[in-house]
Image (cartoon, grey):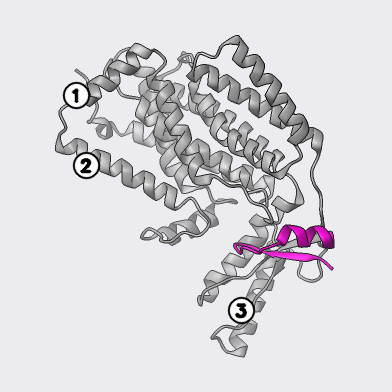
Amino acid sequence: MAFGTVEFAQIAGAGETAAKLGKTFLCFSPKGKNASVKIKACLRSVRERNVQLVYIHPAEETYSEFLAYAGAIKRGLSENSFRSGKFTALPLWNGDSYSFLFISLATLAGALWLLSVIANTGRQFEIAYVVIALSCSIFFSASTSWRLFIAFLATVTFPVLAISKTWTKPALPPLAGALWLFLKVSFISLLGGVFVSAILSSTDFMVKINTFRGVKLSLILPPALAFVILYGRERSYFSTSLSRLWHKRLEVRHLFFGIGIAVFLLLMILRSSNKMSFVLPFEMEVREALEKFFFARPRFKEFAVGHPLMIMGFYFYAKALKIKKIHFRPLIILGLIGQVSIINTFAHIHSPIGICLFRTVNGIALGALLGALLIAADGFFKFIDHK
């Protein structure tokens, strides 16, 4: 007998029950009244999230309508090269302890590097850090709590580490240079995503008995750390900037700009969970169009928000020597939303790694295109002060 976990449902004692039975699988039950929406949800769950059992039951439709609905799901599975019938439950697999040890040490080393950028760490602190990191990795690397901590640490560390490096301005035109720097940063975030996927590689995460935690916090911490790094490489510059900002006369446009950023960040945080309490107008239509066009739908916060902002920030960074009052740092800081989303994509360990890679590459390509188009629109940057 195997234990089945229901996607998006909290089941008390799921881990203990699965451990006793020795086998488990992931099942999905569509909700709602729209048959077309439920059919697409079922096909998406099998294709993108490794669901092995789809549980459907009559709601308010007639018997003939329910048979047609079930038949449409079966045909859709066949068209996507899936077979319906008996399946084999997954045996419990706890992952490879040596891989967990390596990834734990690599992530903690990256965190130490980031700490050395933010603060002036001394030799004694670094030695103590290495000893503690090595000891904890050896003794706790197989622990679920420790792996979740390392996954969260990687989600925060790698995107900030990518933009904390003082990148040399490439000998390219500003737009091409911005795209090249963006690809470098995205590669480091992608590496962090692979680390997160590897540290969470075990059956309990694959079937969502355990899930990655801290998604909302991971959206807040990297921009906060990036603010300290980008504005505080020199303490005098950091203090001077804060003093100038504190004494600056507040105008109505500043108030609206601040409210807009706050609302935007709030929306990003509220929509970071699997259960969205609201959707934007025409959002579902856009999602369906992207699913039809792309093999794996790119995430909105990546291609439409984070990536274009970061490319614009790097574009202004490339021109900062000629135009002193260009403010590229806020754009790079907000652009980290896309980089964090890349890593969070790989935290969905129940999704096949190929789907995660396709989704990430699609987001990078579409975001790069949108960022380049925004830069090419001359009138879009009238707010920049060229004095």
Disc 1/disc 2 C-alpha distance (Å) = 18 Å
Nearer-N-terminus badge (1/2): 1
Who's the residue at 75% across and 61% down the image? 25
- Around disc 2, counting alpha carbons within 10 Å, would you say few (fewer than 14), some (14 to 19), or many (20 or more)? few
Quadrant where the image shows the N terminus:
bottom right
Image height check: is 80 above or below 245?
Answer: below
Q: How many marks?
A: 3
| Nearer the observer, 148 or 205 | 148
- Magenta residues? 1-22
Q: Secondary structure at mark 3?
A: helix
Residue 52: percent from left, percent from top = 73, 63
Mark 2 residue type: Phe
Who's the residue at 64% across and 80% down the image? 57
Nearer-N-terminus badge (3/2): 3
Q: Which residue is mark 3?
A: 69
Quadrant where the image shows the C terminus:
top left
Q: Which residue is mark 2?
A: 256
Disc 1 vs disc 2: which is toward the camera? 1
| Nearer the observer, 186 or 248 | 248
